[in-house]
Each structure stands twice: as C-alpha cells, then as structure tokens.
C-alpha cells in the first residue's frame, strides 16, 4: 500500500474510532469488567471490521477482550501478538469527542475550537510536522489517540497484510483490551488463550520511540491502630492513630517523591489516607526501575512501622505490601531477538528509532510478568495523553503501521 493510501486509511479509521465513547471508570472496577459498558461499542465495531476484512477466528469474551487471529501464510514461524486498548482515561472529559483534522499544519500555536491553545513552545515535536496532517479534539475533550491511534495502526497493518499476498507472515494475534487506563484490564485476562510467542503493545507516544523498560511497582496498605480515651482523661494513655500516620508520612524522604524525581530515579507516593483516633489507614505506592531499590523501599516502610511502635508504646502498625507489576525489561532480555527485530525493521525503513523508559506500566508489562511473553511498547504518534490538548500526527501513524508490517516480515524470515 502506498503511504498516501495508508495515511487516508489511518485517518478515516482513527476519526471513526475516536468518535465512539469508550471512557473507562476506575470507580467501578471492583463491580464490573469492563468498568463501563460503552467500551464494548468499539470492541464490537472492531469485531465487525475484522469480519469484513475476512478474519474468521475472532473471539470477544464476557469482559470485552477481543482476540482474533490472522492465519500464517508460511510454515514454522512463531505467532506475533499486537495489542492496544480501546478505553480512554477519565482524567478529563473523554466522551463526545469531535476530532478536528488540520490537513496542512502551518507551524506555530494551534488554537482549538474551544479557545484552548496547544503551544508550540510546550510541544517541541510539532515543528517536524509543518506542512503535514495533525488531528486534535475540539478542546472540550481529550482526543483518545491513547490508544485509538494504536488500535488504528494495528487495524491498518492487518488490512495491509491481507491485501498484499506477497508479504510473508506468521500467525498474527490481534488483542484489543478494555480498562487499560484503570490498570485493571489484565485482571481478567486469560493468558492460556494466547498463541503468540512475543507481542507488541502499540500504546506509546512520540514518533520513533520504543519502550522496553517500565517501573517495578508495589503498593503498601498500612494500618495504624492506636488507643482511644476521653481527651480529658488521656494523659499517658491515648495513642492517637492520626498522630502516627502523620509521623509516618513525614518520615518518608521527600527527595524520593514523584515531584522530586525523573529519569531513572524511583519514588514513594502516599496516595490515600483515612482515619480516626483509634484507627488510620494509609496507601503508599513505590516505583523503581531497579528491583533492588524497590525492595529497599519496601523494607523502609516496614521498618518505619516497627520504629513507630517502639516510639509510641501501645501503637500497632501493620504494613501489607503487594506487588503490582515488574519492569518488563527482565523478560525482554531473555529474548533479545524481539527488541532486535524492532530496530532491524526501523533500519530497513529508514526510521531513526530510539529506546526509552516508561515511568509507569503498560498492559504489556503485566503480560510480560504474568505470562513470560516479551511485550515492548511501540510509538503511536500521539501526544499530550489524558489532556484536552492531546494531538496525533498522521505521518507518525503511517510510520508506526509500516514498522508493524516490517517487524512481522522479519518475524517470518528464517
Ligand atoms: Zn494507553
């Protein structure tokens, strides 16, 4: 497919998907999967489009996870997975998206219909797209390039493979998930169903950026139990759980907070608390690229608890830690060929790919950790995710799709 036709295909596809409401809801994740029924609208739209493309093996489970297979046209080649999520974040208004196409970006600031301005000085990636096509929202909602750009790129790549018989490929496993933004989409994922030996999430941002590393993540639930007495009668007897939780938080090093770190530095982040004299609870999460550093922080939180128990006789501090996900690079390092195939594909296409780290996690990180399937993350060409000033660059979407096809070709070489 020539790049002009591909760009047109990606654009119409993306506009179609972006207009479908798919916002997920972190407040209902304990009650239902997916967290919002509307996500199924896009899942079923994609299901129908895959049927129209001629795919036969398509399954949508009760949780809205779509897994489809394009059969291989060569023998003895490992199956490759391509994964993206249909939901959008709830950080800003995400439903009722009216995508706006700037066919010819002239450079400078972009003023959206709502009056909101995407400033050139805050978006240094913009200048490479002068004279090219960008897509924004009207400024009243996010755009949803995260991750409908990724969904579009996978769909266009599949269409490309189907329309061009000369491209040799192994079996392709297409995976569209719900609830990535709530972090709970993979809770109900049935890994046993998967055929793929390795997988790519198409859920990154900046053109040419390849992400193979993410944080290790754990969460601590800390319970402070004090001893309540009438305050007029409390001397030497009252142990105030709220005092304990205050001391606890103030002992966590401020230099290891999200607001004081970047790059490869990890952190602690207190994110919820509740309490009374008698009992208080605190939630803290920890993040680090280095597992040893994460374990060190976990130990610090446990030690802080027992220190408070010594300092305040009668106090009880319980620290319960659970892991959330691990740095996916550990799994990728076991199969270096997967990362190599991305960069080889970039070289063949003349795309200056570079690798980068995610200060967060992806569904791919969970897949890597929970199933051992390597799952690096590829760029989509979207920017300013989870905000009203989100935008996507069509040329980067073309590059992303071509990269997928080239990786698949390399996967079929002996
Ligand atoms: Zn995403």
Image (spheres, rainbow, N blue to C red):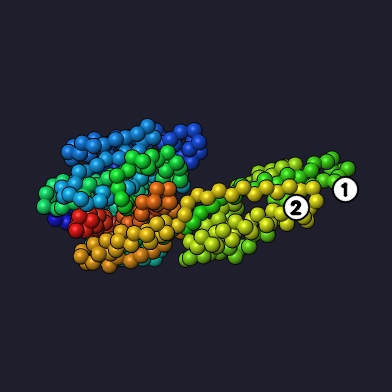
Pinpoint residue 28: horizontal percent, then vertical percent. 49, 36
CA neighbours of label 1 inside 10 A, class few (<14), some (14 to 19), many (20+): few
Task: Give the left or right position of residue 43, taking residue 289 as reference.
Answer: left
Quadrant containing the C terminus in the rendered view: bottom left
N-term mark: 2 or 1: 1
**Can you tell which mark lies on residue 309?**
2
Q: Nearer the viewer, residue 199 or 405?
A: 199
Task: Identify the element where label 1 is drawn.
Answer: loop
Q: In the image, what residue occupies the spot 29% across and 57% down?
A: 393
Confirm or deny contact between disc 2 and disc 1 (CB under 8 A). Answer: no
Q: CA distance from mark 2 to mark 1?
A: 18 Å
Residue matched to label 1 = 235
Whether residue 264 is situated above or below residue 46 in the rendered picture: below
CA neighbours of label 2 inside 10 A, class few (<14), some (14 to 19), many (20+): some
Pinpoint residue 273: horizontal percent, then vertical percent. 64, 46
Q: Nearer the viewer, residue 279 or 395?
A: 279
Task: Identify the element where label 2 is drawn.
Answer: helix
Pinpoint residue 107: horizontal percent, then vertical percent. 29, 64
Whether the residue under disc 2 has CB within 8 Å of ligand 1: no
């Amino acid at each position: 497919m020539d790049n002009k036709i591909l760009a047109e295909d990606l654009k119409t596809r993306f506009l179609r998907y972006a207009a479908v409401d798919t916002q997920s809801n972190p407040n209902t994740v304990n009650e239902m999967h997916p967290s919002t029924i509307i996500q199924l609208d896009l899942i079923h739209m994609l299901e129908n489009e895959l049927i129209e493309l001629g795919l036969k093996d398509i399954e949508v489970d009760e949780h809205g996870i779509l897994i489809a297979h394009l059969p291989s046209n060569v023998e003895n080649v490992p199956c490759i997975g391509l994964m993206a999520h249909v939901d959008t974040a709830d950080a800003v208004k995400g439903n009722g998206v009216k995508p706006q196409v700037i066919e010819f970006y002239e450079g400078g600031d972009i003023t959206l219909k709502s009056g909101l301005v995407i400033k050139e000085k805050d978006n240094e990636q913009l200048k490479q797209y002068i004279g090219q096509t960008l897509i924004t929202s009207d400024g009243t909602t996010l755009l949803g390039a995260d991750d409908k750009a990724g969904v579009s790129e996978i769909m266009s790549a599949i269409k490309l493979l189907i329309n061009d018989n000369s491209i040799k490929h192994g079996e392709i496993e297409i995976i569209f998930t719900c609830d990535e933004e709530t972090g709970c989409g993979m809770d109900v994922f049935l890994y046993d169903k998967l055929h793929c030996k390795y997988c790519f999430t198409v859920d990154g941002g900046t053109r040419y950026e390849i992400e193979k590393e993410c944080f290790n993540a754990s969460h601590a639930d800390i319970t402070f139990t004090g001893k309540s007495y009438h305050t007029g009668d409390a001397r030497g007897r009252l142990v105030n759980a709220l005092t304990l939780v205050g001391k606890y938080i103030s002992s966590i090093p401020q230099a290891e907070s999200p607001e004081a770190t970047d790059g490869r530095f990890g952190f602690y982040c207190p994110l919820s608390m509740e309490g009374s004299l008698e009992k208080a609870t605190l939630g803290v999460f920890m993040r680090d690229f280095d597992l040893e550093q994460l374990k060190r922080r976990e130990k610090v939180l446990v030690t802080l608890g027992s220190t408070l128990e010594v300092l305040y006789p009668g106090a009880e501090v319980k620290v319960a830690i659970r892991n959330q996900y691990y740095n996916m690079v550990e799994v990728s390092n076991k199969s270096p060929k997967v990362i190599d195939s991305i960069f080889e594909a970039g070289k063949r296409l003349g795309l200056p790919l570079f690798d980068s780290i995610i200060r967060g996690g992806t569904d791919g990180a969970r897949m890597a950790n929970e199933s051992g399937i390597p799952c690096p993350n590829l760029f989509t060409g979207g920017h300013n995710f989870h905000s009203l000033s989100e935008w996507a660059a069509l040329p980067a979407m073309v590059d992303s799709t071509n990269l997928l096809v080239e990786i698949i070709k390399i996967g079929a070489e002996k």
